[in-house]
Amino acid sequence: MGPPVYPADYLLCAENSLIDQSRHARMGRTTTNGDGFGLGWYGERDEPGLFRDIRPAWNDDNLGNVAAQIRSPLFFAHVRAATNGGIARNNCHPFRYGRWLFMHNGQIGAFDRVRREIDCLIDDAYYHHRLGTTDSETFFCLMLTHGLEDGPPAAFARAVAQVEQVKAEQGVNNPLRLTAALTDGGTTYAIRYASDPEAPTLFIGHSQPAEAGAAPLLIVSEPLDSCPDHWQKVETAHLVTARDGHYDIAAFTPDGRGL
């Protein structure tokens, strides 16, 4: 987020670009992320633009063409390694609801064993909006149910607590791993949480100053360059809140009160 930029500067041209990460992630548990991609961006319309497809990001010329032509003050981009849900466009991140975009690294452990119970907790207004079959979109809908539009940090806390509660009730020991990003086009939230010690990585920093002056603020799963001074690692069980080039990192604890 920051001065309008071309997404291609980061997706294709950075030292450790997202295209490079799709071929060989340096820090991810899954090295190759070739099961689809997505780009969501904010412009002059009320809702963000969204371009997703099932081809590997490194093998889709349209992604490069779009990313080199649009300019945006805030965009999300994701490459997918399928863990839950088949390879389909509707299962590619980011997911959109109104002004909101959401994307996720990680998984709800043993999702097939708890999916029905979690589905029943989603409000009908959001359940019928869901188009795919992933645990990630399910979690997004659960956050919407828990008042995302009124308070994203509280929605994160209550949704995590509810997933953990369902897992415990069903005797599921497989971990919830949630490194995720959420935005309404103004404020961006990013979380790093897991119920085991293996939360996917998260960093925040600056790289490749924009032509307009100030360097954009970047929230990424892996640093985009090899300069450690550019990046701050977000520790597990923390939530980032970023707006207007400034950010705050606070401890995160699930909140099961009233569930």
Image (spheres, helix red, strand yellow):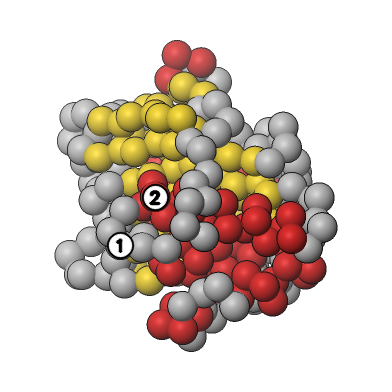
x, y percentage for residue 28?
A: 69, 39
x, y percentage for residue 220?
A: 49, 38
Residue under label 1: 149
Image point 47% across, 57% down: which residue? 258
x, y percentage for residue 117?
A: 67, 73
Q: Nearer the viewer, residue 134 or 220?
A: 134
Using the rendered image of the protein, determine whether residue 157 is visible from the camera's viewpoint. yes
Residue under label 2: 154
| Local secondary structure at mark 2 | helix
The amino acid at mark 1 is Glu
x, y percentage for residue 133?
A: 64, 75
Number of the label disc, if any, that sits on residue 67: none
- Crowding at dot 2, Cα within 10 Å, few <14 / some 14-19 / many 20+, comes out as some
The amino acid at mark 2 is Ala
- Crowding at dot 1, Cα within 10 Å, few <14 / some 14-19 / many 20+, comes out as few
258 to 137, vertically: above or below: above
| Local secondary structure at mark 1 | loop
Image point 25% across, 40% down: which residue? 243
Q: Quadrant of the image for the N terminus?
A: top left
116 to 185, vertically: above or below: below
In the rendered view, does 255 fall on the left or right side of 193? left
Image point 55% across, 63% down: which residue? 139
214 to 158, vertically: above or below: above
- Quarter of image, res 201: top right
Q: Earlier in the sequence, mark 2 or mark 1?
A: 1
- Quarter of image, res 53: bottom right
- Quarter of image, res 59: bottom right
